[in-house]
Amino acid sequence: MREVPLPHCEFQPRPYHGPTADEVLALRREFLNPGIFLYYGKPLMLVEGWMQYVWDETGKRYLDALGGIVTISVGHRHPQVIDAARAQLETLQHSTTIHLHPAAGEYARHLASKLPGDLKVCYFVNSGSEANDLALLIARAYTGNYDVVALRNAYHGGNAAALSLTAHSTWKFNIPHTFGVHHALAPDPYRGPYGRDDAQAGRKFAADVKQLIDFATPGRVAAFIAESIQGVGGCVVFPDGYLEAVYRFVRQAGGLCIADEVQTGFGRMGSHFWGFATQGVIPDIVTMAKGIGNGYPLAAVVTTPEIGRVLAQRIHFNTFGGNPVAMAVGKAVLEVIECEKLQENAHRLGTRLLSGLEKLKQKHVIVGDVRGKGLLLGVELVKDRARKEPATAECARVLENARNNGLLLGKGGFWGHTIRMAPPLCITQADVDFALDVLDATLADI
Ligand SMILES: Cc1ncc(COP(=O)(O)O)c(C=O)c1O
């Protein structure tokens, strides 16, 4: 495969003196949960990061085009985020919500200012799974209903509640996991029954949610939950009008609408700060994680004062929810997104990346579909375009070759056949052109 040079970078990583990758792998095999998985035939060990780049133990540099699985929003080790965390760590590392601390309220006010309508009451937790679990609790307590509609091909996390929402057999353990949860058709215009050539696709996919409410529930539901773009499911973008129609059906059935913005929030969409806004809807509850903390364990559920009040029926507590260091990090992340105009950057460079990927689709028949918004993009690989047979092994080879050429990509989709790209929002045009060049070379090699 032709070698593509990485864009220039001034930053010099420190020399690495720790254990070798083989030693780390041996430790992991003996002492860590065997359920965690690794990318690549020869696992990659990362020891340092700076903005959009990461380095392995040999000093080799990579463009992190998956952003630590859609988590690095403003850049690895962003100085403003580090300074905010350090200042708070050196003052008061931990305090819980049983006492006052200025950070949580200040950050919540800033976060609420980014949300539309009356979405302003924030509950802080530590992970996306926890946020979705809490959102379900709030919806069920508020509505008095139990049934929930989620989507096939969804990923909402791995704890017991989130696993009930997640809809890939690959993630679901054989336990009573979907009690009260019904999965509607994934509104996938590439693989679903209604394609991009169908202007009514959004309305038709939404009709399946109505069918589920009518035929699989008591006619009353607690909630509908969806990612605004299905990330793990392979960057599936819903047809226009889909969420608007679904939200109407769900509200008619007494339910709340939950937007899982774990991957799509915080400016990544480019055109909008939140993914739901690209569909012209306002949810009742928004869950967020990953990019909110740029790699720090921070997540949140935001709802309206009226709905949020329901948690006051009982004692509700989360030890690290509202931790001052997490709050300082979250506030710094929002400030960096604003000061460095990262949403605008996501829009400009996401548009360039998407149009470059479209050109690769014209050139390489293995590319079945290209899609996404801003800097959350997917390239679905198929063995042949008519039958759309997933090209799983080929996708793994693209990832390997790209890695060898200094580009870290992700994969998703039920068959692991969709290349996923979600770089830090601080990437440059040179990075985008590099990624496209590497992809072109690897696809030509397949
Ligand atoms: C859309 C979405 N929701 C929820 C989660 C779960 O987040 P966490 O891994 O922080 O529990 C993920 C994780 O990948 C996700 O992509």
Image (spheres, grey):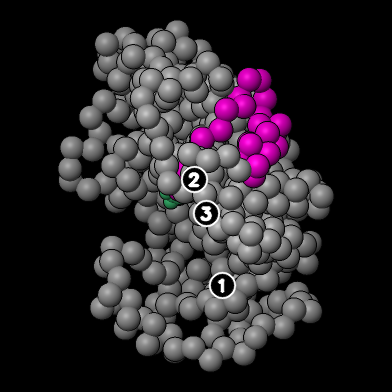
**In this view of the protein, which residue sits in the foreground, 182 or 260?**
260
Spot occupied by residue 394 in the image (x, y as percentages of width and height): 44, 65
Residue 327, percent from left and from top: 61, 48
Q: Nearer the viewer, mark 1 or mark 3?
A: 3
Q: Secondary structure at mark 3?
A: loop
Q: Quadrant of residue 58?
A: bottom right
Name the residue rendered at 32%, 83% in the picture: 26
Q: Does 68 sit left or right of 147 as displayed? A: right
Q: Is residue 25 visible?
A: yes
Rendered location of residue 28, percent (x, y):
33, 76
Earlier sequence position, callout 1 versus callout 2: 2
Mark 1–mark 2 contact, CB under 8 Å? no
Check contact, mark 2 vs mark 3: CB within 8 A.
Answer: yes
> What is the magenta range?
102-128
Q: Is residue 424 left or right of residue 250?
A: right
Residue found 32% across the figure and 81% down from its top: 27
Does 378 appear above or below 154?
below
Which residue position holds label 3? 94
Local crowd size for mark 2, using a 10 Å CA cut-off: few (<14), some (14–19), many (≥20): some
Viewer-closest of 218 and 132:
132
Q: Which mark is residue 402?
A: 1
- The residue lying at 43 percent from left, 73 percent from top is 40
Tell me how far mark 1 sits from mark 2, CA to CA: 44 Å
Q: Position of residue 47 (x, y in %)?
A: 55, 78
What residue lies at 68% left-to-right and 71% top-to-bottom? 50
N-terminal of the two: label 1 or label 3?
A: 3
Q: Is residue 75 depicted above or below 112 in this figure?
A: below
Q: Is 116 displayed left or right of 418 in the figure?
A: right
Q: Secondary structure at mark 2?
A: loop
Amino acid beneath label 3: His
Find disc 2 in the rendering and name its residue: 96
